[in-house]
């Protein structure tokens, strides 16, 4: 199982939000590229980047910080989301050296456009599916839509997506564990890999995702707070977490 250390960027800094609330922010570093090097030095083989300002603004904001991360990451691939709502945004981001882009709000609001993008960039686009109580949220989690998760999955069933990142917003940043049953249900309804996101607080939580047969897991606050070392997270992703 792939472990994705998360680097969330706001105002050029590495931060984490509690349940997507911009008013509940913790700053973990002034230089996101240094954080990228830190995780790579500890064995990270993928990085998950989020432009939080971009998600709220509806256009990329922290482009310079993301470019520095890509340069620092070297051969380690990065995926990025947050505010990517036009083909120009996608083209520019991929041209920076980003391996995969994550589309959320516009993909849900304008599925015809999103489908065209997945066919124009097959295997390079990830669908960000963020939900609370089974209903999808958009606009940087600020807006609840009338779409259910199941409706979205039916709509995208034949799109050539690279993956789906599924986040239960009610768990994100809480360290109370990922909503594994909901994520497994999404995976069962999808033909592409589904990456678990939101709420990882311990090695046991990562083991639960691994045991559910999911191919990837994003880990954020637990790494930054020191509750989980990246070495232990990677071991859990390999099925080597003894005692669980």
Image (cartoon, helix red, strand yellow):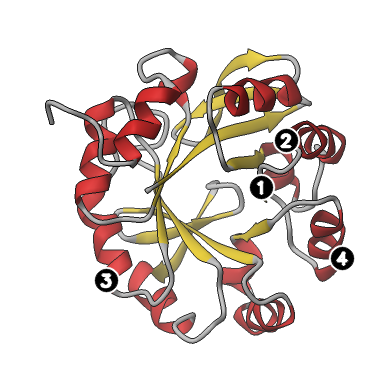
Question: Splitting the image into 4 quarters, where does residue 231 fall?
Answer: top left
Q: CA distance from mark 1 to mark 3?
A: 26 Å
Mark 4, mark 2: which one is toward the viewer?
Answer: 2
Q: Residue at x 65, y 85 (%)?
A: 112
Foreground disc of the pair 3, 2: 2
Residue behind mark 3: 188
Question: Is there a contact, CB below 8 Å, between mark 1 and mark 2?
Answer: yes
Mark toward the start of the polypeptide (1 vs 3):
1
Asked whether the residues under the numbered discs 3 and 2 touch, taking CB atoms below 8 Å apart as contact, a structural biologist would say no
Q: Is disc 1 surrounded by few (<14), some (14 to 19) or many (20+) residues within 10 Å? A: some
Q: Are marks 1 and 3 in contact (CB under 8 Å)?
A: no
Q: Quadrant of residue 223?
A: top left
- Look at mark 2 in the image and give the residue it sits on: 73
Comparing labels 4 and 1, the label whose residue is closer to the camera:
1
The reply to whether dot 4 and dot 2 touch (C-beta < 8 Å) is no
Tag 2's secondary structure?
helix
Classed neighbour count for the residue bearing mark 4: other residues with Cα under 10 Å, few (<14), some (14–19), many (≥20)? few
The residue under the point 77% across, 26% down is 11
Residue identifier under label 1 = 77
Give the left or right position of residue 191, taking residue 95 as reference: left
Q: Which mark is residue 88?
A: 4
Crowd rating for badge 3 (residues with CA inside 10 Å; few <14, some 14–19, many 20+): few
């Amino acid at each position: 199982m792939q472990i994705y250390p998360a680097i969330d960027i706001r105002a050029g800094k590495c931060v984490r939000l509690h349940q997507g609330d911009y008013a509940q922010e913790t700053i973990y570093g002034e230089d996101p590229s240094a954080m990228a090097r830190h995780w790579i030095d500890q064995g990270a083989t993928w990085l998950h980047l989020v432009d939080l300002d971009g998600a709220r603004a509806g256009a990329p904001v922290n482009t310079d910080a993301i470019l520095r991360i890509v340069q620092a990451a070297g051969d380690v691939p990065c995926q990025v989301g947050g505010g990517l709502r036009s083909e120009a945004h996608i083209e520019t981001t991929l041209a920076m050296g980003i391996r995969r882009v994550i589309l959320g709000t516009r993909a849900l609001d304008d599925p015809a456009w999103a489908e065209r993008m997945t066919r124009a960039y097959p295997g390079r686009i990830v669908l960000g599916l963020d939900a609370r109580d089974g209903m999808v949220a958009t606009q940087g989690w600020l807006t609840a839509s009338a779409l259910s998760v199941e409706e979205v999955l039916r709509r995208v069933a034949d799109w050539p997506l690279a993956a789906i990142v599924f986040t239960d917003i009610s768990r994100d940043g809480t360290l109370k564990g990922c909503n594994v049953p909901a994520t497994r249900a999404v995976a069962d309804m999808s033909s592409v890999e589904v990456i678990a996101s939101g709420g990882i607080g311990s090695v046991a939580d990562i083991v639960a995702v691994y045991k559910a047969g999911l191919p990837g897991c994003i880990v954020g606050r637990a790494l930054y707070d020191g509750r989980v070392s990246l070495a232990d997270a990677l071991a859990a992703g390999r099925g080597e977490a003894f005692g669980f």
